[in-house]
Each structure stands twice: as structure tokens, then as C-alpha cells.
């Protein structure tokens, strides 16, 4: 039924309808320009907010940066970064009293820093700016406090574009072997390149960090599963996929209706909006048996956490790689993990992740 609080918007929670909408790019458009202020006119989330043929052209430009061979070249470096972060939490051989009330905020110590370092390396920017990047990306997706999410989001986009404009100008003079350098060599114009940089910074940081936090939260309440993973690392992939189904970082995807259509028995007109509830679709009992159970051994596949069709997340492979490496390195180091306190979620309906997650870690 229509959401009367948002006229002309239909929320879709059934898996089959959600998948159909994501596949039908002619009836359900992704084009929705993002204008953050008069100074940022024309800025947009690249790929998320375009239809073919523009989407196809832009995806072809960036997709080669995320092919499996390039991602595998990052594996060893990411493992070293994870180890360097974990080296003091706690040191090997030191036991932590899991029943104590002292925990480690794993979001601040690991699951936020690692995705930031990875995306910084891909873009060729210094880690010294990470604190500002994190503040801007949080505000851009509506996590900010104070002046109000909308105003902070506009300011964040402006600041991100200012930063990357300087980076682009520097790399024009000093070509670099990174994503910005590669796109410059392809002749991508400055506005499109700015949009690529900001989109990759936000998506590569916020969604990956949320997945990592959601994954550790689920495992911290399932000690038997942690033990099973330590004994059999082949289970890691299925645990990550079930986390994506059960607790996806992005909860909603919107589409604009381009012509009259019936969705879930409701007649929609051109200009109406369809809001796909990814979290609900991933728990549709028509497709997923016992959907409220976290079950890495389930046979049903096809979650929509990374969208579907032509808009399937171009960075999905990188996100999975980071989750796999983080979990593998933690399993090497810690015999158990447990919640030290209830996690604090971001107050955001569209993005599902933890702002703080206190864990107790017991090392070997």
C-alpha cells in the first residue's frame, strides 16, 4: 500500500517485486541529480544516479579498477594493515577478562579505519586526512549531528569536492598510478572525476565499515560459530554472505517511475517513486526459509545487499575481500569475542551500521 506520509511513494518489501524493479531500468529510473548547493550544481553519485547509456559509459571507466586480479594484489597489504591495527588489542598471549566491563570500540579501532585506508590507497590520497574524510562521509550519508543532517550533508559534499579538486590538479602535473591518475589518463573531465572520487570515498568507506561492524556484532553473540570458523576458514565466505542478507549496510534503494505501471497491486504513474526495502526483501519468507534466523549454511542465495542488475555494486568484490581478510586475521589472533555493551547504531533509516560497538577480545 502507499505510504501516505510520503505521497506518490510506494515501499516495496517483497523480494520478487524488488528484484523485478532493479532489473527493469526502462520503467524504473535511477536518474536523480544530487544538487548540494549553488556551488555544487551538477554533482552526483556516479553510477547510482544515472541510467544507460550514461551509466554504461561511466561504469566502463571505473570497472577495471575493481577486477579480481587488481583486488588480489591488495590482499597482502590489507592483511598487514589489519594486523597493525590489531597489534595492541590485545597483544598476543595476553588474556582479557571477557566478563569485565572494559571493552574495545571495534568500530573506532578497526572497522572504520581499515576501509578508509583502503580507499585512500586506491585514490592515492594521504591517510593524514582520514579524520576529515570520515567526518565528511558520515555527514554526507546523514549520520551527522548538530546543524541537521541535510545542511551538514551539503557542506560535506562541498568540502569533499574542494579537497579532490586540489588532488586532481596535483595529479595532472604529477601523474600517479592510482584511480585518479588512471581516470585522468583516460581523459575523464574534472566534474566527472570529482564525482567518481566523492562516490568512491563515501561508498567505499561507509558501506564497508557498516558491513564489518554488522559482521562482528553478529559473531560476538554466537560463540559456537566463532569456534567453528576458527576450525574451518572455508566457512568465512558463507558467513559474510549471510551477514549481507541478514543485516545489510544499505536498507533502501529508490527508483523513479517513468511510465504507468502496477507494482504489488498498486497503480503508479510517471514521476512516482518506488522505495525498495532491501532489509525486508532479504527476509522475504517466500524465498528465504526461516528468514529471521542467521544461518550461514542456508541454501537460498540471491540477497539484494549489493543491488541487482546493471547497478550491482561495482565495489562488491573489494568489500567482500576486506571482510574476509579482517575476519581471517581476527580468527588467527582471538580465541573468542563477546559484546562488552549493547552496540550503538547510527540513527539512520537508509544506512544500517554501528557508530560504536564495544567488544571483549580474548587472545591466544
Image (cartoon, grey):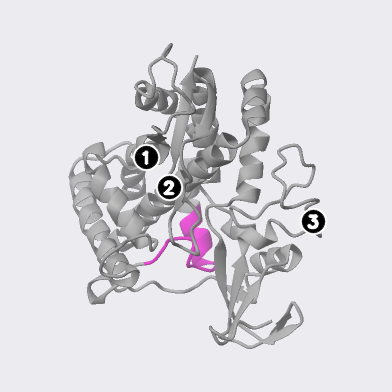
How would you rate the neighbour count of disc 2 (Cα within 10 Å): few for under 14, some for 14-19, many for 20 or more? many
* The quadrant where residue 77 appears: top left
* The quadrant where residue 196 appears: bottom left
Q: Say if 206 sits above or below 37 in the image.
A: above
Residue for badge 1: 122
Q: Foreground residue, 277 or 145?
A: 145
Residue 58 percent across, percent down from the top left: 46, 58
Q: Say if 178 sits above or below 83 in the image.
A: below
Dot 2 lies on which element?
A: helix
Residue for badge 3: 287
Dot 1 lies on which element?
A: helix
Q: Foreground residue, 95 or 355?
A: 95
Q: Nearer the viewer, mark 2 or mark 1?
A: 2
The first of marks 2 and 3 along the sequence is: 2
Dot 3 lies on which element?
A: loop
Determine the CA span between mark 2 and mark 3.
29 Å
Direction from residue 256 to residue 198 in the image, left or right: left
Determine the residue positioned at 56% across, 64% down: 252
Residue for badge 2: 204
Q: Nearer the viewer, mark 2 or mark 3?
A: 3
Tell me where the magenta segment starts and ends, as one range.
44-59
Tag 2–tag 1 contact (CB < 8 Å): yes
Per the image, is 54 magenta? yes
Q: Say if 242 sits above or below 285 in the image.
A: above
Amino acid at each position: 500500500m502507499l505510504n501516505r506520509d510520503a505521497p506518490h511513494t510506494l515501499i516495496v518489501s517483497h523480494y520478487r517485486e524488488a528484484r523485478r524493479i532493479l532489473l527493469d531500468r526502462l520503467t524504473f529510473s535511477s536518474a536523480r541529480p544530487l544538487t548540494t548547493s549553488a556551488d555544487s550544481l551538477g554533482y552526483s553519485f556516479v553510477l547510482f544516479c544515472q541510467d544507460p547509456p550514461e551509466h554504461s559509459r561511466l561504469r566502463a571507466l571505473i570497472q577495471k579498477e575493481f577486477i579480481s586480479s587488481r583486488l588480489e594484489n591488495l590482499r597482502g597489504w590489507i592483511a598487514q594493515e589489519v594486523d597493525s591495527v590489531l597489534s595492541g588489542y590485545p597483544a598476543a598471549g595476553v588474556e582479557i577478562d571477557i566478563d569485565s566491563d572494559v571493552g574495545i570500540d571495534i568500530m573506532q579501532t578497526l572497522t572504520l579505519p581499515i576501509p578508509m585506508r583502503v580507499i585512500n590507497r586506491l585514490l592515492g590520497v594521504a591517510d593524514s586526512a582520514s579524520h576529515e574524510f570520515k567526518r565528511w562521509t558520515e555527514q554526507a550519508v546523514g549520520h551527522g549531528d548538530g546543524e541537521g543532517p541535510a545542511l551538514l550533508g551539503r557542506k560535506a559534499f562541498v568540502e569533499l569536492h574542494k579537497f579532490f579538486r586540489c588532488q586532481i590538479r596535483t595529479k595532472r602535473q604529477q601523474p600517479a598510478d592510482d584511480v585518479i591518475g588512471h581516470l585522468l589518463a583516460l581523459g575523464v573531465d574534472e566534474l566527472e572525476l570529482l564525482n567518481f572520487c566523492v562516490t568512491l570515498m563515501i561508498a567505499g568507506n561507509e558501506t564497508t565499515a557498516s558491513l564489518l561492524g554488522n559482521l562482528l556484532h553478529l559473531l560476538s553473540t554466537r560463540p559456537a560459530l566463532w569456534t567453528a570458523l576458527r576450525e574451518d576458514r572455508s566457512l568465512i565466505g558463507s558467513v559474510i554472505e549471510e551477514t549481507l542478507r541478514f543485516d545489510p549496510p544499505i536498507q533502501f534503494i529508490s527508483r523513479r517511475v517513468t511510465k504507468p505501471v502496477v507494482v504489488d497491486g498498486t497503480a503508479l504513474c510517471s514521476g512516482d517513486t518506488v522505495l525498495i526495502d532491501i532489509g525486508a526483501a532479504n527476509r522475504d519468507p517466500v524465498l528465504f526459509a526461516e528468514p529471521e534466523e542467521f544461518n550461514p549454511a542456508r541454501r537460498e542465495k540471491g540477497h539484494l545487499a549489493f543491488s541487482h542488475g546493471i547497478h550491482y555494486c561495482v565495489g562488491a568484490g573489494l568489500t567482500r575481500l576486506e571482510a574476509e581478510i579482517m575476519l581471517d586475521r581476527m580468527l588467527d589472533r582471538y580465541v573468542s569475542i563477546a559484546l562488552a555493551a549493547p552496540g550503538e547504531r547510527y540513527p539512520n533509516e537508509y544506512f544500517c551500521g554501528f557508530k560504536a560497538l564495544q567488544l571483549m577480545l580474548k587472545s591466544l
